[in-house]
Image: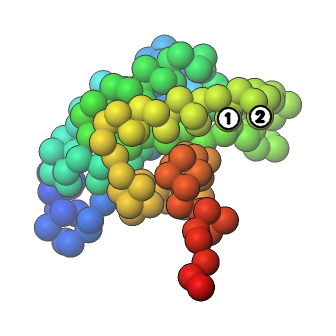
Amino acid sequence: LDLEVVDKYKEAGYRTIAMNLEVWDKHIYKAVCPGKELECGGWDHWVKALEYAAQVFGHGRVRSNIVAGIEPKQSILEGVEYLASKGVVCFAGAWNPNPGSAFEGHRSPEPSWHFDLARKITAIFRRAGFTYDQLYDCAASPTTLCHDIYKIEDEALPAFQQKAG
């Protein structure tokens, strides 16, 4: 709740910071993230914290994540676009309902749905001016589909490199 903690991370020497929003649609957020809604100031405060963190850490140095597959694709893209406009890199990892969770038995959308989403998110990232290095630096794991799409589009994979000789 206290945004000054963001400043403390920066003062301590951190280059990046991550705060996962999980869901962009405010109404779905309240249902799916009741702990964040009740204990962390709710959706509006979470977005405010991300915006503040981007001011403190800089463009492309703050990461968030939306769980892709819980809400409509257009809602996710609206969230990624909005956050990118504020300098926040927002990935959308594929939803994988855990056994024993309230969502056990539900399923994530088809792989083609997720691939289309990743291509659209990558286009948003490029329009926002995020570099591959920024994505790599702020990601929890630099193996997202968006990372791969960047490398393919830039022909940066080893298969594209010419051998000397």
Total of numbered circles in the picture?
2
Q: Position of residue 7 (x, y in %)?
A: 15, 57
Residue 97 position, x and y percent, is 75, 38
Q: Classify residue 28 by image quadrant.
A: top right
- Inspect the image, locate mark 2, and give the three-letter code of the amino acid beneath it: Pro
Q: Residues within 10 Å of mark 2 (few under 14, many from 20)?
A: few
Q: Nearer the viewer, residue 103 or 127?
A: 127
Find numbered disc 2 in the image and state the secondary structure of the residue it sits on.
Answer: helix
Residue 115 falls left or right of residue 77: right
Q: Which residue is mark 2?
A: 111
Q: Residue furthest front?
A: 165
Q: Is any part of residue 18 visible from this angle?
A: no
User: Is there any visible trace of residue 63 in the rendered image?
Assistant: yes
Position of residue 29 measured from the top left corner of the image (x, y, whole percent): 49, 24
Q: Residue furthest bottom?
A: 165
On-image quarter of the C terminus: bottom right
Residue 79, compared with residue 152, is above or below; it is: above
Badge 2 vs badge 1, beta-carbon distance below 8 Å: yes
Observer-nearest of 109 and 99: 109
Q: Secondary structure at mark 1?
A: helix
Q: Give the distance between the C-alpha atoms of the residues marked 2 and 1, in whole angstroms.
A: 6 Å
Residue at the limit of the structure toward the right, as seen here: 105
105 displayed left or right of 152 = right
Q: Which residue is mark 1?
A: 115
